[in-house]
Image (cartoon, grey):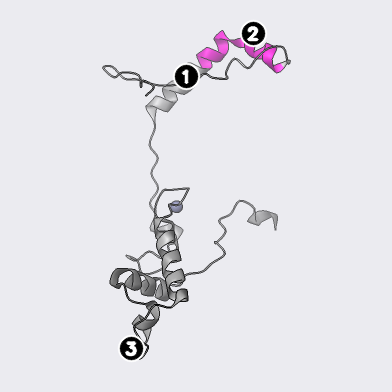
């Protein structure tokens, strides 16, 4: 069981590609998903149809906390016509030079405030890092001003 910790877990619902396509069609057409499946059924929305389609729409609006894409894309990517796989993504890394500059600035700051930091760790004084915010600016840029 231990090897499962930290691995991606599927959410407690499952949307197969066929259902996802049907729900997309229901959203786009404004017709009940049941009606789309069965031409003999009356063209009315039942409470359950509304519930399912509204939950699907909600999932399409909710963003994945990891990558910011619509969460529903991970469960059913309409371009691919299926659930996404890790192989669908190419990975890139970008060096954020502003963050790297901050890391260097923080190291200098820690050296300059070593006595206060050590005192704080011994319970003798406030945390000198509390309330310190780190910003960067380039030549010609202004620091952001509070609104
Ligand atoms: Zn994601």
Crowding at mark 2 (Cα within 10 Å: few <14, some 14-19, many 20+): few
Tell me the SS state at disc 1.
Answer: helix
Q: Which residue is mark 2?
A: 115
Residue visible at 43% across and 48% down in the picture: 67
| Residue at left offset 58%, top offset 54% | 7
What is the x, y in percent for residue 105?
47, 17
Q: In the rendered structure, which disc, 2 or 3, sits on the residue that comes first in sequence? A: 3
Say what secondary structure mark 2 lies in.
helix
Total numbered labels placed on residues in the image: 3
Q: Is residue 94 magenta?
A: no
Numbered mark located on residue 86 in the image? none
Q: Is residue 72 above or below residue 46?
A: above
61 on left or right of 114: left
Quadrant in the rendering for residue 76: bottom left
Q: Which stretch is magenta?
A: 107-121
Task: Using residue 25 as the reference point, say whether residue 68 is left or right of it.
Answer: right
N-terminal of the pair, mark 2 or mark 1, is: 1
x, y (%) of residue 114?
61, 10
Residue 39's disc number: 3
Instruction: For the C terminus, give its image quadrant.
Output: top left
Marks 1 and 3 sit apart, C-alpha to C-alpha, by 67 Å
Judged from this view, the residue extending furthest toward the left is 140
Q: CA distance from mark 2 to mark 1?
A: 19 Å
Marks 2 and 3, how far apart in space? 78 Å
Residue bearing the label numbered 1:
104
């Amino acid at each position: 069981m231990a090897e499962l910790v930290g691995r991606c877990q599927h959410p407690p619902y499952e949307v197969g590609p066929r259902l996802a396509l049907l729900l997309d069609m229901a959203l786009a057409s404004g017709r009940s998903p049941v009606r789309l499946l069965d031409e003999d059924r009356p063209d009315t929305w039942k409470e359950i149809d509304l519930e399912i389609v509204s939950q699907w729409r909600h999932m399409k609006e909710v963003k994945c906390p990891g990558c910011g894409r619509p969460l529903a894309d991970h469960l059913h990517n309409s371009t691919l016509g299926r659930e996404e796989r890790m192989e669908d993504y190419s990975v890139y890394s970008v060096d954020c030079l502003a963050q790297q500059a901050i890391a260097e600035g923080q190291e200098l700051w820690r050296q300059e405030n070593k006595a206060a930091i050590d005192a704080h760790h011994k319970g003798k004084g406030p945390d000198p890092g509390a309330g310190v915010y780190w910003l960067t600016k380039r030549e010609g840029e202004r620091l952001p001003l509070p609104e």
